[in-house]
């Protein structure tokens, strides 16, 4: 979810989360609109590890595609 020219733009994931818990969606919107402070969430080591392994997996596949298809493979840089 983000703001674009004052309008709220939601993703499919945002809408899925809203269908599970409307309060959580509204709370997230309040934070985006700066009506509430974000809630500090402790880092989840398992989630961090899974993300790291997923990134390594994607890099291995990207290397395979580059080896097989050469310069015709386009890679999109990760957002910060």
Image (cartoon, helix red, strand yellow):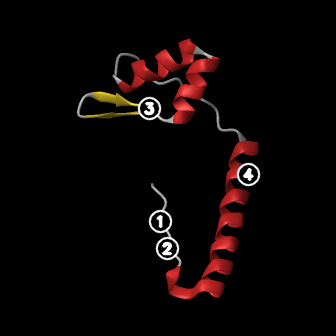
Marks 4 and 3 sit apart, C-alpha to C-alpha, by: 27 Å
Residue 28 versus residue 48 in the image, above or below: above
Does label 3 or label 2 sit earlier along the sequence?
A: 3
Q: Nearer the viewer, residue 78 or 43?
A: 78
Marks 3 and 2 sit apart, C-alpha to C-alpha, by: 27 Å
Q: Residues within 10 Å of mark 2 (few under 14, many from 20)?
A: few
Q: Position of residue 4 (x, y in %)?
A: 29, 36
> Which mark is on residue 74?
2
| The image quarter in which residue 20 lies | top right
Outermost residue toward the left in this view: 5
Q: Position of residue 29 (x, y in %)?
A: 42, 21
Does label 4 or label 2 sit earlier along the sequence?
A: 4
- Can the viewer see residue 69 in this picture? yes
Q: Are marks 1 and 2 in contact (CB under 8 Å)?
A: yes
The C terminus - image quarter: bottom left
> Which mark is on residue 49?
4
Marks 4 and 1 sit apart, C-alpha to C-alpha, by: 22 Å
| The image quarter in which residue 32 lies | top left
Direction from residue 80 to residue 7 in the image, left or right:
left
Q: Nearer the viewer, residue 77 or 14?
A: 14
Marks 4 and 2 sit apart, C-alpha to C-alpha, by: 26 Å
Q: Nearer the viewer, residue 36 or 68?
A: 68
Marks 1 and 2 sit apart, C-alpha to C-alpha, by: 7 Å
Q: Are marks 4 and 2 in contact (CB under 8 Å)?
A: no
The local secondary structure at tag 1 comes to loop
Q: Mark 1 — residue?
A: 76
Query: Residue shown at 47%/24% (left/top)?
Result: 38
Q: Mark 3 — residue?
A: 10
Q: Are marks 4 and 1 in contact (CB under 8 Å)?
A: no
Query: Residue shown at 65%/61% (left/top)?
Result: 55
């Amino acid at each position: 979810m983000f703001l674009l020219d004052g309008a709220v733009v939601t993703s499919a994931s945002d809408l899925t989360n809203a269908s599970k818990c409307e309060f959580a969606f509204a709370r997230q919107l309040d934070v985006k609109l700066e009506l509430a402070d974000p809630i500090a969430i402790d880092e989840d080591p398992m989630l961090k590890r899974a993300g790291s392994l997923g990134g390594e997996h994607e890099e291995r596949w990207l290397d395979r595609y580059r080896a097989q298809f050469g310069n015709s493979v386009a890679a999109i840089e990760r957002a910060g």
